[in-house]
Every structure is written in C-alpha cells, then in structure tokens.
Image: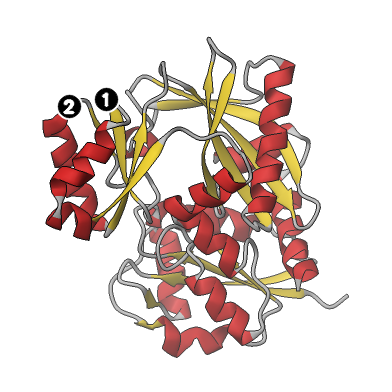
Amino acid sequence: MEKTRVLVLAGGQSGEHEVSINSAKSVLQALPKDRFEVTSVVISREGRWLAEPESQRALERGSAPSGGELVLHQAQVAEGYDVVFPILHGPNGEDGTVQGLLKLAGIPCVGSSVLGSAVCMDKVMAKAVLAAHGIPQVAYQLVTRAEFTSTPEDAIKRINTLGFPVFVKPANLGSSVGISKAKNDAELHAALRLAFELDRRVIVEAATSEKPREIEVGILGNDHPQASPVGELTFDSEFYDYETKYSAGRAEMHIPANLPPAIAGRARAMAIEASKALDCAGLARVDFFYIDSTGEIFLNEVNTMPGFTKTSMYPALWGAAGVGYADLVSRLVELAQERR
C-alpha cells in the first residue's frame, strides 16, 4: 500500500513555540510508519523556514535557532505532500495565514481552513458569530487603540458599564499573552496599555458572579463533529494566566470533570454547535466557564489547534473516550484528506 506523505510544521512565532515543537515530536513518533511517510519542518520564532538539518536539530533541542528562509520562499517544499499537519499556534500559524497558503497550493491541511482559523483566532469576531447563534458568553466591550488614544474617556465609560473586575485581552493573541485582570481604574488603564502594545483591538470582559470552573471539550470531525468527555482545569491563581499555563504543577487536569450529567451534556452539545457555527474542521478544543451555584455555562473561546503533546488536554480528552494518541493523529490526517 502506498504511504500517505505528511509534512508536519512546528515552532512558529507564538509563546507556545516550545509546546508546538514538543507536540510535533509526539506526532512524529505516533503516526504509524507502515501507513505514513512523515517529514518535519520547524519555523523559527522570527517566522523563518528552517532547512531539514536545522529543523531536526530544533526538534532535538526543543527550540529553533535564528536564521532560515522566508516562509513564502520555501513553501514550495510542501508540494508533493498529501497532507500538511500545521501544529502551529497563534499569529502566522493558527490564524488562517498558513492555511490560506496551503489552500492556494492545493495541499490539504489538518484542522480548520482559512475562515474557521481566522474567526476563532480573533476573539471579537468569534464572539460576534457565537452571539448570532445564541451561545451564552460573558458581557464584553471592544476597544480599539485609535479610540483609546483619541477619546479615552468614552472608552472607559463604555468599559465601566461592565463593572469591576474585568479581564483585558488582546483580540488576536493566544497563550494568555497580554491578559490582565483589572479591579479598579488604575489597573484598567495599565491593562489597556499592555494589551495595546500587542494588538490594535482589545476585548474587555466582565467577570462572572463567582470564580468559575474552567471546563473543556474536544471536538473531532468535519461536517458531523463529535464531542469528547468534558475535562476540567483546576488551579489556585485568580485566572488561567500565562504563568499558570506554562509552570509545571500550577494546574491539574481532571477527566472526566466532576459535573452533573445534564451540565456535561449541555457543554458537549454547545461545543458541537459552536464548532459548526465557526466553521471549524478536523479538531478544536472548546473552553467554557461553569458557575456552580447557578448552573450557568459561558463559552470562553475556541482553539482550532490546541496543544498536542501526549499529556495535553485535547488528546487526553479523547483518550478518555477510548481514542488512543496514534489513532487520533491518524484520524486527523484522514479528516484533512476527506475535507479536500
């Protein structure tokens, strides 16, 4: 039987550069050698395409060196592969840019295409789509850098309708980068200045009535997606910030989450509805806030290329459903080919 040729792209410019490389190593080890011929390319933190020897060294070290060629100049390397698996996170990887490049080249890629990737990456656009479908979310306000610079009083007045505390987030960054919790006007101004250093559009979200439980659902499939069991992240910090996310021992996964069956069922149904509304494909991880005292569920965000190490939440969720890691990555390659 002729093997499927797979090109795995890893690294990239986000704060999850090392997570991406570790995910790629796991995928490379897991894809069955009797069915797949797999090659890997690492993209540096500067967004440069590394040649095969440098890519291999980056995988061994867990981080990419500087150097390399422009991605646009080297993308022809992908020609001849049956599928590209872009295990890339954040801007210039998970936001539809790489997906668009591959679409123009006529090469199937694992995960969502241009629209789903771009909309899910942009928190403001994702919220607008989800609101149109009646999916519950916390109250929020969009503030642009231009507005905050020219008429800061008007921007603050709108934000103050949310009450304190609020969470301030760049609209187009992942990994909890640039996110702050503001409990008063002084902290709000500092949080906005930080976020505007990273993005020209910022979203300010109201806090829930009490500290929420953070629950997550994995989605697998194209036109008929399936939902995994519900998992939960627990941690002691005020919110799931960058330090908590990437410091060992700061957070714990619980799969399945200790939830009433009706709540778990509602979260799974909502995750499928959201993935369809946002035109996701292949895989997604849908994150929610759950309020114990009221039974409310609010959709937080949809991640179209979640971390993919063997201990990451997404594969762990499907492991709890009886889908092993090797079967999961093989299925994702098949889904990419099916979508073509």
Q: Kindly indicate the quadrant of the structure image that contains residue 166.
A: top left
Q: In which quarter of the image is the C terminus?
A: bottom right
Q: How many marks?
A: 2
Q: Quadrant of the N terminus?
A: bottom right
Q: Name the residue under label 1.
A: 164
Q: Kindly indicate the quadrant of the structure image that contains residue 82.
A: bottom right
Q: Which mark is residue 184?
A: 2
217 up-or-down from 114: above or below = above
Which is nearer the eye, 151 or 127? 151
9 up-or-down from 247: above or below = below
Q: Which residue is drawn at 58% across and 79% down?
A: 102
Question: Mark 1 to mark 2: distance in Å?
Answer: 7 Å
Which is nearer the eye, 158 or 227? 158
Residues at marks 1 and 2 touching, judged by CB atoms closer than 8 Å: yes
49 up-or-down from 174: above or below = below
Position of residue 294 measured from the top left corner of the image (x, y, whole percent): 55, 13
Position of residue 78 measured from the top left corner of the image (x, y, whole percent): 58, 82
Does residue 306 appear in the picture of this structure? no
Q: For numbered disc 2, what is the local secondary structure?
A: loop
Position of residue 275 measured from the top left corner of the image (x, y, whole percent): 66, 49
Q: Which residue lies furthest to the left in this view?
A: 186
Which is nearer the eye, 317 or 50? 317
Q: Residue 243 carries which label?
A: none
The amino acid type, in three-letter code, at marker 2 is Asn
- Left or right: where does residue 57 sit relative to residue 221? left
Q: Within 10 Å of the Cα at label 1, are there few (<14), some (14-19), or many (20+) other Cα atoms?
A: some
